[in-house]
Amino acid sequence: MDWTALSGALALALAGFGMQERDPGNAADPETAATGDPDTEEFTETLILERDSNQRLTVPVTIMGQGPFDFMVDTGAQATVLSEDLATQLELFDREPALLIGMASSRMVETTIVPEFALGERIFTIRQAPIVDGANIGSADGILGLDSLQNQRVLLDFRNRRMTVSESFEAGGANGYDIVVRARERLGQLIIHRARIDGVSTAVLIDTGASGSIGNLALQRRLRNRPALEDATMTDVNGVAVTSETRIARSLRMGEMQITNFPVSFAASPTFTHLGLEDEPAMILGMNELRMFRRVAIDFRERRILFEFPDELTTDQAWNFNDRATRLHD
């Protein structure tokens, strides 16, 4: 099994990275920041999702009025990333070094400030965007990370291929979702701490930038007797490849939901270390499993993740996906 350009769960190990949001009506002023005034009209933006060659999601963005460029939506990436070709095209040559932590490696990279980064009608200044070889992020021009999505409700509608980013949490609510799972925040990531994999209490991260699901070595030790598959080769955002043992997990329970018989590859990843999860069982839940749902909403402000089952499931099937999870939903 070969997962190319698996960039999920990257982090920038340098304090102060992130973005400053600006009023779209005053986009020419780089010092104008969002005020958070409760009387201000709340923002909702819907974007069309596309899929790259690894079945991950991309959305169009513009930068300094140029574009649109295709950015992969990565809920496991702390930082928004640019390809080297795009940074050169935009003439973003004011750069500083930083340590970029990927799934397989930690590498020093260049970072740059990105002015007038527009996701729909929202306009940001990204203060520190890592620059990587475009071959390491597949066909995308960049990665849309958590620094662009914090304090928002992000709705991924797989059936209709739409992403909605909204500040309106009361309007979004939980209506229409089958399962609502609470999560904890750590370094910008939402981590589900009450999940159980084959009865083992496991911390789970929802990662739309990962092709498949990846467990740490603590989880690997607990699942060592599970059926083995062909080893997986994963290449991270730094271009470093690692070959990993892959086994079949019989069951993942999150609240009342259960997913059965899905592959998990294992890696001694610096990502788990960065999040303080190297000593307890932990897993990144990737796109192969996520795309079987009709909708997944990630509510960063309320720290919860909402799942809607596909239409073809009947009520008596709703709590148990009882086939290979990656084959349930095209």
Image (cartoon, rainbow, N blue to C red):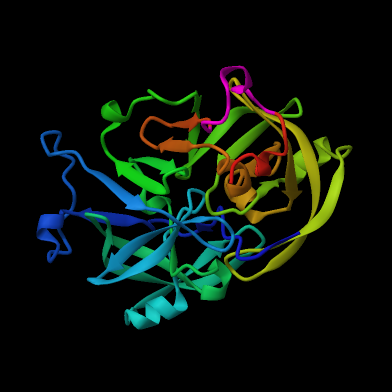
- At 61% from the left and 37% from the top, the residue drawn is 204
Residue 31, image x, y percentages: 16, 61
Image quarter hosting the N terminus:
bottom right
The part of the image, by quadrant, that contains residue 113 is bottom left
Q: Residue 133: tell me if it is visible.
A: no
Would you place residue 66 above or below residue 76 in this image? below
* Left or right of residue 116: residue 286: right
Q: Tell whether position 274 is magenta.
A: no
Of 314 and 255, nearer the camera is 314
From the top left corner, tell me how far across and down residue 65 is, in percent.
22, 71
* Placement of 51 over or under 188, stated as above or below: below
Answer with the quarter of the image where residue 153 lies. top left
Q: Position of residue 175 (x, y in %)?
A: 38, 23
At 27% across and 47% down in the image, what residue appears? 45
Is residue 134 depicted above or below 157 in this figure? below
Q: Residue furthest right?
A: 225
Residue at the spot 45% in from the left edge and 26% down from the top edge: 177
> How many tags in the picture?
0
x and y, in percent, of residue 84 in the image: 46, 78
Is residue 258 visible in the rendered image? The answer is yes
* Identity of the residue drawn at 62% across and 64% down: 236
| Image position of 294 (left or right of 96) | right
Q: Is residue 113 above or below residue 20?
A: below
Magenta-tinted stretch: 310-321
Q: Nearer the viewer, residue 246 or 36?
A: 246
Horizontally, residue 175 falls left or right of residue 22, namely right
